[in-house]
Amino acid sequence: MLRNLTESKGVFVCGEVRRGKIHSVTMELIGKARELADKKNTDVTCILFCGDLAEVPEILFSYGAERILLIKHEKLTYFNQEITAKLLSFIIKKYKPEIVLAPATSEGRTYLPAVAAMVHTGLTADCTGLDIDPENGLLLQTRPAIGGNVMATIKTPEYVPQMATVRPKTFRIPSPSEFCGEVIIPEIPDNIFESRIKVMEMEYNSANATNIQDKDIVISGGKGLKKQENFSLIYELAELLGGGIGASRPTVEAKWISYPHQVGLSGKVVSPKFYLAAGISGAVQHLAGMQTANKIVAVNKDPDAPIFKVADVALCGEIIDIIPRLIARIRKEMN
Amino acid sequence: MKIAVLVKQVPDSDEIRMDPEKGTMIREGTGNIVNPLDLNALEAGFVLRGKYGGEVYVISMGPPQADIALREALALGADHACLVSDKFFAGADSWATSLVLAKTIEKLGPFDLILAGEKATDGETGQVGPEVAAMLDIPFSTYVSSIELCDGGIEVRRTIEEGYQTQYMALPCLITVLNDINEPGMPTLSLKKKARRAEIKIFNSEELGVSKEEAGLAGSPTRVVKIYHPKISRQTSFYSGREIDEGLEHVVEILRDLAVL
Ligand SMILES: Cc1cc2nc3c(=O)[nH]c(=O)nc-3n(C[C@H](O)[C@H](O)[C@H](O)COP(=O)(O)OP(=O)(O)OC[C@H]3O[C@@H](n4cnc5c(N)ncnc54)[C@H](O)[C@@H]3O)c2cc1C
Ligand SMILES: Nc1ncnc2c1ncn2[C@@H]1O[C@H](COP(=O)(O)O)[C@@H](O)[C@H]1O
């Protein structure tokens, strides 16, 4: 929608509910939305679409939302991009927010672009930085491009809402403060819940196979492991630390490990507190997926391996020697 | 089945080199390739054509040299190729790209199925597929790692954070694919020859009925206002040989600081 034809106001956050639970990225986004809203002297609304909610939505007030739009419907139990996109477009047309933030998860990255097309506005993908331009109050959206080697700051000057998807774990969850706000249950026309898509079935990963993007610790293996059996070292260390398992592309191509574990440009982007890369050379495509980790440890026998350039600790030597020693050392520490 | 595959030409990231001093990318002299996931989309189209018959159209919006990407798709087995190219299309964001692609699909269609990559390696937005579908008002699915035709519609398996979701859609629809859906094939010599000589349709804004104001930079709601090269400066502590024990100690210290141990 063209800005000068619309009166738009407020920062809206699209919350994410998985299996009845509010996902932490919702709180991260509310915290950031609060900062932005304070700079613009406006308020924060969180939209929750769900089939059912195991928690009380009011807890979201304590992170900075003053309004919650709660839409519960059995058709929202499992993700349906068509229904969700129609719903958000309806809400945007009805409430006219100036800014809309959503998680850059498989859900947000699926329905938000459809909404951008439906309401005719811009959408900036995978933002890692958000701010307000002090001169004109526009949203400054910063995102990595070309494998994280370039950062681009993007504006949506003439259209509203200004929309962005934001990588989970980019912003800190604020510490909870005083509660207050209202929960609104908007009236939604029935035809919005009609869809040409039928959700047939969900298969959930086992608990220890949770998405590596949600892990604080990721231990990754590369071709330097030499053979699939040596991946057991990675599993052992990951289990010891309660971490997720990552991998470089060639190990996935060699079928040593499945695709959801691939870290990098054509895999997943992770930003854990601790990332360990064993036998990974550090090609730019791999670095694009992990270089924003808080602490990076690399094990490689090649002293010139590019992975060492982004590492805090470089352990130069044989994997099959170093990893077992590290495991033993950590075990000792734990006892 | 009449299938359209959206194919983008991207810089060859294998050739991207970093300037070690400045931490910047050296783009001079890098080649262009077909976006890797688009090759998976193309292969998915060939598999369906093989089973159910029909034709595969490849469509690309880009500068005249994107012609090379389309010839590569023809050499792999595509039946028709169409390049949408116009100086007014330059600088398009995902909205303006999607508009042009949607108009092209309308012009060449109707199609039963449109396939795209989940994301491109240069812009990495992953937005074009869903935006095109919304503009065409057809159902769509993303992150797809398998496609099965059944009951006159399509069943897809999506790889998502928590596992897998199966969805069923009526045709026509649009699907964006991941790289675990298949192994892209290789071009054959005879197809390569044919592709070299093939005629590639080129459409400009006028032929598509897209106005200058709607396309390219002018039609893009978003504006890049700044580009910079982040410097991730880390102090690397290097340990080798007999120092490894000291290095392990350092790792344990980090884990303690992070309250993991
Ligand atoms: C468009 C595109 C997208 C891509 N996307 C991704 C992506 O998303 N993710 C990704 O990971 N890659 C991606 N790649 C591939 C990437 O360019 C590299 O090929 C890949 O990351 C290299 O994997 P590796 O480091 O495991 O293997 P190698 O390059 O073979 O490196 C193995 C390393 O292990 C070391 N080593 C060997 N033996 C030992 C030992 N015994 N002890 C200690 N160290 C040892 C070697 O010195 C070497 O540094 C992509 C490529 C392209 C073109
Ligand atoms: N200019 C383009 N021409 C043809 N297809 C495109 C173009 N841009 C994007 N696509 C398609 O949309 C997918 C996602 O691209 P992106 O949204 O740029 O990450 C790609 O894998 C292509 O299938």
Image (cartoon, rainbow, N blue to C red):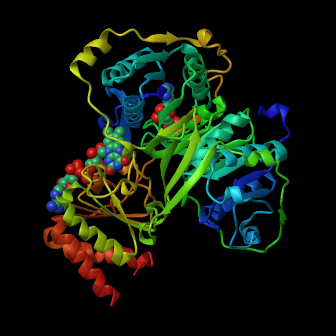
Q: Looking at the picture, how far across and down is residue A296, in whole percent?
A: 36, 63
Question: With respect to residue A191, does B4 lie above or below?
Answer: above
Which residue is nearer to you in this view: A23 or B225?
A23
In the image, what residue occupies the spot 34% across and 36% down?
B13
Q: Looking at the picture, how far across and down is residue B81, in whole percent?
A: 43, 17
**Lateral position of residue A285 relative to residue A140, left or right:** left
In the image, what residue occupies the spot 60% across and 13% down?
B208
Which residue is nearer to you in this view: A288 or B85?
B85
Q: Is there any visible trace of residue B95 in the rendered image?
A: yes
Q: Looking at the picture, how far across and down is residue A214, in whole percent?
A: 49, 64
Which residue is nearer to you in this view: B70 or A303?
B70
**Lateral position of residue A284 relative to residue A95, left or right:** left
In the image, what residue occupies the spot 44% across and 28% down?
B8
Which residue is nearer to you in this view: A115 or A41?
A115
Q: Is there any visible trace of residue A304 in the rendered image?
A: no
Q: Quadrant of the N terminus of chain A?
A: top right
**Lateral position of residue A158 relative to residue A219, left or right:** right
